[in-house]
Image (tube, rainbow, N blue to C red):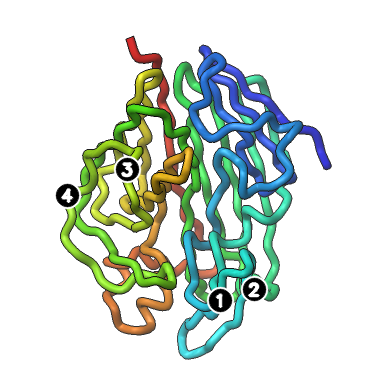
Amino acid sequence: MSPSITLTGTGLRCEIKPELGGCIAGLWLGDIPVLRSTPASALRSVRLAGCYPLVPFSNRVGHATLNWQGTSHPLVQNNEPELHALHGTGWQRPWQVLDQSEQLLMLACEHRPDASWPFAFDASQTLRINGNTLELTLSMTNQSATPAPAGIGWHPYFAKRPGSHIHFEAAGCWEMSDEKLPTHREPSRGLDTACTPLDVDHCFDGWGGLVELRDELLHTRITSSLTRLVVCTDSTRDFVAIEPVSHVNNAINLLQAGAGPADALGVRVLGPGESMSAHMGIQVELVQ
């Protein structure tokens, strides 16, 4: 496996494993973990990483079947025993290093049609430490000869400590079935609550682009250009997954089922050669 890469800045240290899904193994402010963090040399599973990119879709495609323009495309069940396709393909593929410095890393990943996703695309991500902020950009370009559905996002796992408190504003929340698939949308103002007792695994829409996460050690601000947010934690987990994403869970199949218009579900259709991109920032400071 190729060596890991470390970015450093004003107190921040980020370790990345490009070959392991282009993932962030860990992010620390000094010696304090910001994300669920493992030294990159010790990380063996991307599912235990601190963060990984979501492309060309986030969350689940129900029952690993993509229904698109009258055609049913079977996908790989890539997180067995779960019956769905999960988090796209980028997190399970190696990424190539395009450029790097002490504070900057540029990665790329190329996908050709296969059983995991029937449309060709290229993806790139940039990670940069700027002062006390980790800045991330993720882009994808449709390389198919026909229009293709597309979605992007990130899956960061933030360390959950005693006293952790989450606050963000939203307009709606998608309720979930026992199969972890969205059923319907309810109005929601977001969350403003302690994390320890929180039991949630939902996608919020109408998100304002800012999450405040505080505990006795750190104040973390998560910002993004995306307007949907998946939040996942429960009392047994030592992390809070706070995931900026471009679309509702299972959005493409919901669109085909008539659950809402494409704009409301966040479904993007990229023409041949067309791209989409987004950014996320993780700003961290010590609690005084």
Label located before the other in sequence (1 or 3): 1
| Mark 4 residue type | Arg
- Picture coordinates of residue 63 (x, y %)? 52, 78
Contact, mark 2 vs mark 1 (Cβ under 8 Å): yes
User: Which of the labelled discs sits on residue 76, or is there none?
Assistant: 2
Estimate how packed mark 4 is, as few (under 14), some (14 to 19) or many (20 or more) residues with alpha carbons within 10 Å: some
Instruction: Give how far apart the Cα atoms at labels 3 and 4 are.
Output: 19 Å
Instruction: Give how far apart the Cα atoms at labels 1 and 4 are.
Output: 31 Å
**Left-right relation of 92 to 231:** right
**In the image, what residue occupies the spot 38% across and 67% down?**
267
| Mark 2 residue type | Val
- Picture coordinates of residue 129 (x, y %)? 53, 24
Helix, strand or loop for disc 3: loop
> Would you say residue 274 is visible in this rendering?
yes
Label located before the other in sequence (1 or 4): 1
Contact, mark 1 vs mark 4 (Cβ under 8 Å): no
| Residue picked out by circle 4 | 189
| Mark 3 residue type | Pro
| Residue picked out by circle 1 | 64
* Residue positioned most to the right: 1
| Residue picked out by circle 3 | 197
Q: Which of labels 1 and 3 is toward the front?
A: 3
**Left-right relation of 52 to 190:** right
Estimate how packed mark 2 is, as few (under 14), some (14 to 19) or many (20 or more) residues with alpha carbons within 10 Å: some
User: Which of the labelled discs sits on residue 281, or is there none?
Assistant: none
Contact, mark 2 vs mark 3 (Cβ under 8 Å): no
